[in-house]
Image (tube, helix red, strand yellow):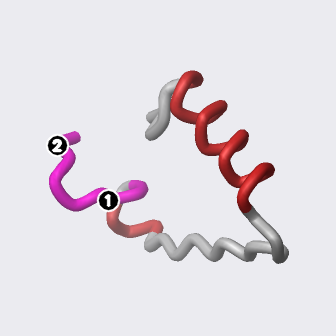
């Protein structure tokens, strides 16, 4: 399941490249027994 469409990915990538002054670390926590990534407010 794709969370972001290609257009949104490019917008985010462009803004991060132009506005970020320091390195950004992103940590994704998941639980395998939940059957995938759960995003509050989004139906499966």
**The quadrant where residue 43 appears:** top left
Whether label 2 touches label 1, CB < 8 Å: no
The residue to which callout 2 is attached is 43
Residue 12 magenta: no
Q: How many labels does the image show?
A: 2
**The quadrant where residue 41 appears:** bottom left
Q: In this view, does 43 lie to the left or right of 35?
A: left
Residue drawn 63% across the image and 76% down it? 27
Crowd around label 2: few <14 · some 14–19 · many ≥20 (10 Å):
few
Q: Residue 17 carries which label?
A: none
Image location (x, y in percent) of residue 10 = 65, 31
Q: What stretch is highlighted in magenta?
A: 36-44
The residue to which callout 1 is attached is 38
Q: Nearer the viewer, residue 31 or 38?
A: 38
Image location (x, y in percent) of residue 21 = 81, 71
Q: Looking at the figure, which quarter contains the C terminus?
A: top left
Image location (x, y in percent) of residue 31 = 44, 73
Q: In this view, does 42 lie to the left or right of 11?
A: left
Crowd around label 1: few <14 · some 14–19 · many ≥20 (10 Å):
few
Prevailing SS of the magenta stretch: loop
Q: Name the element at disc 2.
A: loop
Q: In this view, does 43 lie to the left or right of 38?
A: left
Distance between the alpha carbons at the discs numbered 2 and 1: 9 Å
Residue drawn 33% across the image and 65% down it? 34
Image location (x, y in percent) of residue 26 = 66, 72
- 28 is higher (above) or lower (below) than 41: below
């Amino acid at each position: 399941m794709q969370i972001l469409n290609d257009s949104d990915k490019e917008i985010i990538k462009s803004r991060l490249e132009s506005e970020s002054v320091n390195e950004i670390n992103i940590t994704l926590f998941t639980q395998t027994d939940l059957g995938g990534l759960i995003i509050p407010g989004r139906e499966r």
